[in-house]
Amino acid sequence: MSEGKRHSRWPRGVVRVLRPLASLGTDRRVLAILILLALFVGGRAWLAENPGSNPWAPLDLRDEPGWATRSKIAALRDDPAQCHAVLERSEVAFTALEPLGEAPCLRANRTRLDDFPYAGERPDTTCATAAALEIWRRDAVQPASRDIFGQEVAQIEHFGSFSCRRMYGRDEGPWSEHATANAIDIAGFVLADGTRIAVVNDWQGEGDKAHFLRAVRDGACRAFGTVLSPEYNEAHRDHFHLDQAARGLGGVCR
């Protein structure tokens, strides 16, 4: 059997790796194989220690986020059962609620976070939005608050999640992500000492409150499909719009 036919039994990717090795002397070939083996073993060990960057590791919201975290969260959008399993695995207290409403405002995937530091009414959202809120709170909101103010956020103020309407309240056009509670509007934050930080009052300027709001906005962009802030338009001058719509690679962050 010819050498070409023998190679044809192997996957093309393997052939591409083996072909240059075949041209090496025996000693160099063994050394090259050992180097490749070490890289493979080292890579597997690194992925095991960094599950946030391991696309095959089950998502756990307690893990340090990595380059694969966002795609894992995105995968939860159309799989409520998997999303609830992630919340359970991550020891996040939540309540799965019965579906409510009718299309196009059907809330088929209602999830309420039981321990999230909401101010006032505790809204329900889609599970994927709830999962992103937990990551955002842990990895962006609280670290920024500790770094800038030396204390944690005690409450997160909001304008709600569900509103059966089209975008910007128009009579026609695309339906808002709020129509299915796949979005939430964040209005402000209250620190442990009672200090209030409001998007409408504190976004402008160079003070600590403005730096904090920009930090948590940027942090939200690593967890949500869409983040809209006062920089986007006048309609968002008093809140952050956070949603989990599929917006393509990179999402929307403004």
Image: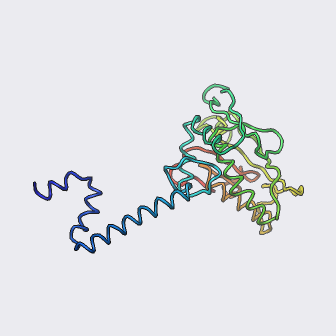
Front residue of 161/48: it is 48
Residue 231, located in which quarter of the rendered image? bottom right
Answer with left or right where residue 155 lies relative to residue 135: right
Q: Position of residue 181 (x, y in %)?
A: 67, 37
Q: Quadrant of residue 210?
A: bottom right
Structure colour scheme: rainbow
User: What residue is at 62 percent from the left and 37 percent from the top?
Assistant: 84
Q: Position of residue 46 (x, y in %)?
A: 51, 61
How many numbered marks have been drawn onto this rendered protein structure? 0
Question: In what quadrant of the picture does the N terminus appear?
Answer: bottom left
In this view, the residue in front, 20 or 212, is 20
Task: Give percent across and percent down for residue 217.
Answer: 69, 57
- The answer to whether 74 is drawn above or below residue 112 in the figure is below
Q: Is residue 219 above or below residue 167?
A: below
Residue 24 location (% of width, % of height): 23, 72
Instruction: Depth check: give the residue in front, 139 or 85.
Output: 85
Q: Is residue 121 left or right of residue 99?
A: right
Residue at the right extreme of this rendering = 194
Give me the residue at 65% from left, 45% from top.
Answer: 90
